[in-house]
Image (cartoon, helix red, strand yellow):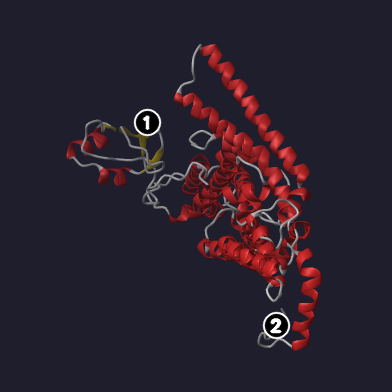
């Protein structure tokens, strides 16, 4: 029986359709034999026959045989089309994942390197550091500066590239860049291996230490001991992991520390990053908190006590990793900070850049405070004019430094100069001669007339003029020394 060819489909030339008929008799059956199907599979999937690869194979089989005049081929096409319905959801999902990754990659691949971007914002950052150097912790438009820094951080190329890498880890089924993530890990393979080994060593050492401590106590650890051990291990693991993460950020030009723990673990293919990221955030927060305390000193009321960090001894101790008296900082965090502050810097790591800026601000502030104390201490010891002493006291009061002892020495020096200037003249009126001594301070600085005005009873006034002595214990008179301001318990005439 003669076979009639079907009419050509719309927009298909007759000679092309005839050619497909000719080819179908010779090639279609062998193309869709089992060996040929396996060849297609190995062409599109180098690992295993997963749903995506199987769906694509069925799509290719259906497309290649759709216009065939062979009955067996059409039956195979029908089976492939039926199978495509099963695989369509995963194919659509993979396509959507591909688009998400491509959108992220299209933004990341056109960006400059972090070092190039850093040169664009370096001028603004240098200006902030210079202000810290000049003012030694004075406040001035810090909120606006922080907003500018947030804008700079959001536009940083390394952050955008980190988001792209996170998309690769979030959508592992994407098929556009199947080997890019493994290539990234290979590039930092040595750092990854060293980081994991050092973190495992910290875990092993802390576990052995805790086990030995429990053995000495003869029992299970208390909840407190367990939590302290976990905290110590978390900080120590962070201290060994952060330098590696920063070096990897530099190598890849990707801000790894800007990722969430899940994203970071997906990008690097390692576990245990949650504690590292939370501890690194606590470390940076500690530095930034003390920077803010110093900057906000002038906003606090005069009755509010100054933050403990606002002294050279406390700030010097903090920068050396020690806890000063009155400070409530975690010693483990402080020790880790002082160690990390001297490690490898990296323009691609926002965390490291922020730590550098905060740490530099604290170092410059401490240096400025030390210079102030040395200069003012020298003025309190040497011959100094009254105007200069007043200027120094004003400078100390306007700074964020707290040093009550130094201020008292400067004021005492000013009083001494006042006494020298007035000689034997009453410091209150500046006219009459000195005739009264205060106790217990023993200062002789007032005339009788000025003291008489301060006495509340006629008996006390009579006692001073007739006997030359007045006891003020239990008296309604509240008389303070005219020179030092100390409460007088008694007065005598000279």
Disc 2 and disc 1 in contact, CB within 8 angstroms: no
Query: Can residue 261 be seen?
Result: yes
- In depth, the one of 104 and 300 nearer the eye is 104
Residue 260, image x, y percentages: 57, 51
**Alpha-carbon neighbours of circle 1 within 10 Å: few (<14), some, or many (≥20)?**
few
Residue 408, image x, y percentages: 49, 42
426 with respect to 387 (left or right): left
Residue under label 1:
440
Q: CA distance from mark 2 to mark 1?
A: 131 Å
Q: Residue at x 56, y 33 (%)?
A: 331
Residue 374, image x, y percentages: 63, 44
Query: Can residue 102 be seen?
Result: no
464 with respect to 67 (left or right): left
Tell me, for residue 42, which label it has, or none.
none
Q: Residue at x 51, y 33 (%)?
A: 325
Tell me, for residue 4, which label it has, or none.
2
Which comes before the other along the chain, label 2 or label 1? 2
87 with respect to 474 (left or right): right
């Amino acid at each position: 029986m003669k076979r009639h060819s079907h009419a050509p489909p719309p927009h298909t030339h007759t000679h092309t359709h005839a050619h497909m008929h000719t080819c179908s008799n010779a090639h279609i059956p062998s193309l869709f034999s089992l060996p040929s199907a396996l060849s297609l599979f190995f062409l599109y999937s180098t690992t295993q026959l997963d749903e995506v690869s199987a769906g694509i194979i069925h799509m290719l089989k259906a497309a290649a045989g759709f216009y065939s005049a062979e009955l067996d081929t059409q039956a195979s096409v029908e089976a492939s089309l039926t199978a495509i319905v099963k695989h369509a959801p995963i194919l659509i999902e993979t396509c959507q994942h591909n688009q998400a990754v491509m959108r992220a990659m299209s933004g990341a691949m056109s960006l400059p390197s972090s070092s190039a971007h850093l040169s664009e914002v370096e001028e603004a950052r240098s200006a902030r550091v210079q202000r810290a150097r000049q003012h030694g912790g004075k406040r001035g438009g810090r909120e606006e500066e922080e907003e500018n820094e947030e804008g700079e951080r959001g536009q940083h190329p390394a952050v955008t590239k980190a988001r792209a890498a996170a998309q690769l880890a979030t959508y592992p089924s994407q098929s556009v860049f199947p080997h890019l993530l493994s290539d990234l890990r290979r590039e930092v393979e040595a750092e990854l291996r060293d980081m994991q080994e050092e973190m495992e060593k910290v875990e092993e050492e802390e576990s052995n230490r805790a086990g030995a401590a429990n053995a000495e106590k003869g029992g299970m650890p208390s909840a407190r001991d367990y939590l302290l051990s976990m905290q110590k291990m978390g900080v120590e693991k962070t201290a060994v992991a952060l330098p590696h993460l920063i070096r990897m950020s530099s190598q890849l030009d990707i801000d790894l520390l800007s990722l969430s723990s899940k994203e970071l673990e997906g990008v690097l293919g390692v576990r245990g990053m949650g504690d590292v990221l939370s501890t690194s955030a606590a470390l940076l927060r500690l530095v930034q908190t003390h920077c803010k305390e110093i900057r906000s000193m002038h906003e606090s009321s005069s009755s509010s006590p100054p933050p403990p960090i606002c002294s050279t001894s406390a700030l010097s101790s903090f920068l050396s990793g020690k806890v000063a008296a009155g400070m409530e900082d975690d010693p483990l965090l402080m020790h880790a900070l002082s160690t990390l502050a001297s490690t490898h810097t990296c323009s691609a790591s926002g965390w490291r850049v922020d730590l550098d800026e905060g740490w530099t601000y604290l170092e410059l502030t401490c240096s400025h405070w030390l210079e102030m104390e040395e200069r003012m201490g020298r003025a309190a010891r040497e011959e100094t004019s009254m105007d200069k002493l007043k200027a120094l006291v004003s400078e100390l009061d306007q700074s964020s430094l707290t040093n009550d002892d130094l201020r008292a020495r400067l004021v005492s020096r000013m009083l001494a100069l006042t006494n020298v200037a007035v000689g034997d003249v009453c410091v209150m009126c500046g006219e009459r001669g000195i005739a009264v001594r205060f106790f217990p301070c023993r200062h002789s600085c007032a005339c009788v007339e000025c003291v008489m005005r301060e006495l509340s009873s006629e008996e006390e006034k009579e006692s001073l003029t007739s006997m030359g002595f007045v006891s003020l214990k239990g008296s309604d008179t509240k008389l303070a020394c005219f020179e030092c301001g100390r409460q007088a318990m008694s007065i005598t005439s000279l």
